[in-house]
Image (cartoon, rainbow, N blue to C red):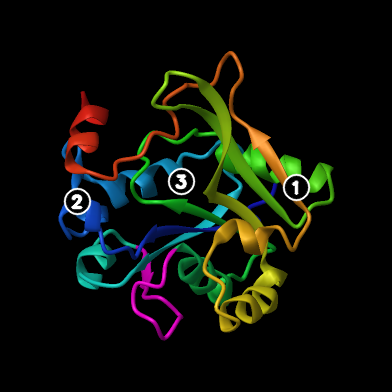
């Protein structure tokens, strides 16, 4: 398959649940989370990812040192949430598709891009979103959407601009306006912890363990 995906790493948050630190620069197995994410994107099966960039709102030089282009939120509101990162990516995407991944989920699947691409093309959708098993506090496991792991057509930029200008901030409220396919990563060969994310330093240490 051709390299028709641009990927953007979402590292533009406040890191409030980590005490305000820049989450993408926290280390996972000795490597900054964002760099670890970048390496997993470069290792994606099928070679479908053509280019990767980072969305960050501080410490831009530290991210640029990873060898990729770095862009702050396109939104005039600082730290406007993941959709601002989506828009930043869409504004600079020169391929048919944009893939978004967060910086705090270091074990996401190496076939993520390929499976989302196959689903979006086979079903004629505008957006493909990963879904994965999550166990709630009562110990019950459900398969839930992972909205920041999203593959979308680059032509959706105008739609997202309009949605955000209207005050929209929730990913699922925007994706609901388009044909969206959920792609389950709950098969026998899928790692149950692939989408585990580190919102706190304790969760980051637990992932490393």
Q: In this view, does 75 lie above or below 64?
A: below
In the displayed image of the protein, which residue is found farthest to the front?
A: 138
Would residue 126 be visible to someone looking at this image?
A: yes
Q: Quadrant of residue 122?
A: top right
Asked if the residue at tag 3 contacts the one at tag 1, i.e. Cβ–Cβ closer than 8 Å, the answer is no
Residue 33: image x %, image y %? 27, 47
**In the rendered view of the protein, which quadrant contains the C terminus?**
top left
Mark 3, residue position: 41
Mark 1 secondary-structure assignment = helix
**In the rendered view of the protein, which quadrant contains the N terminus?**
top right
Q: What stretch is highlighted in magenta?
A: 68-81
Mark 2, residue position: 18
Task: State the separation of the CA atoms marked 2 and 1.
Answer: 34 Å
Whether residue 79 appears in magenta in the rendering, the answer is yes
Residue 78 - label: none
Asked whether, in this view, residue 23 is left or right of residue 132, the answer is: left
Q: Which mark sits nearer the N-terminus, 2 or 1?
A: 2
Mark 1, residue position: 120
Asked whether, in this view, residue 58 is left or right of residue 150, the answer is: left
Q: Quadrant of residue 72?
A: bottom left
Q: Which mark sits nearer the N-terminus, 1 or 3?
A: 3
Asked whether, in this view, residue 94 is left or right of residue 201, the answer is: right
């Amino acid at each position: 398959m051709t390299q028709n995906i641009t990927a953007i790493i979402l590292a533009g948050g406040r890191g409030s649940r980590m005490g305000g630190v820049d989450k993408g620069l926290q280390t996972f197995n000795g490597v900054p989370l964002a760099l670890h994410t970048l390496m997993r994107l470069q290792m994606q099966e099928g070679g479908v990812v053509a280019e990767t960039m980072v969305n960050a709102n501080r410490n831009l030089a530290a991210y640029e040192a990873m060898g990729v282009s770095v862009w702050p939120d396109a939104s005039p509101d600082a730290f406007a949430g993941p959709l601002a990162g989506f828009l930043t990516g869409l504004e600079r995407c020169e391929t048919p598709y944009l893939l978004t991944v967060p910086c705090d989920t270091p074990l996401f699947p190496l076939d993520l891009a390929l499976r989302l691409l196959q689903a979006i093309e086979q079903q004629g959708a505008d957006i493909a979103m990963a879904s994965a098993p999550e166990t709630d506090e009562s110990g019950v496991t459900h398969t839930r959407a992972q909205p920041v792991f999203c593959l979308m057509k680059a032509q959706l930029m105008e739609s997202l601009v309009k949605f955000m200008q209207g005050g929209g901030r929730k990913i699922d409220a925007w994706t609901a306006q388009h044909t969206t396919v959920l792609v389950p990563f709950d098969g026998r060969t899928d790692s149950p912890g692939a989408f585990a994310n580190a919102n706190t330093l304790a969760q980051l240490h637990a992932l490393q363990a």
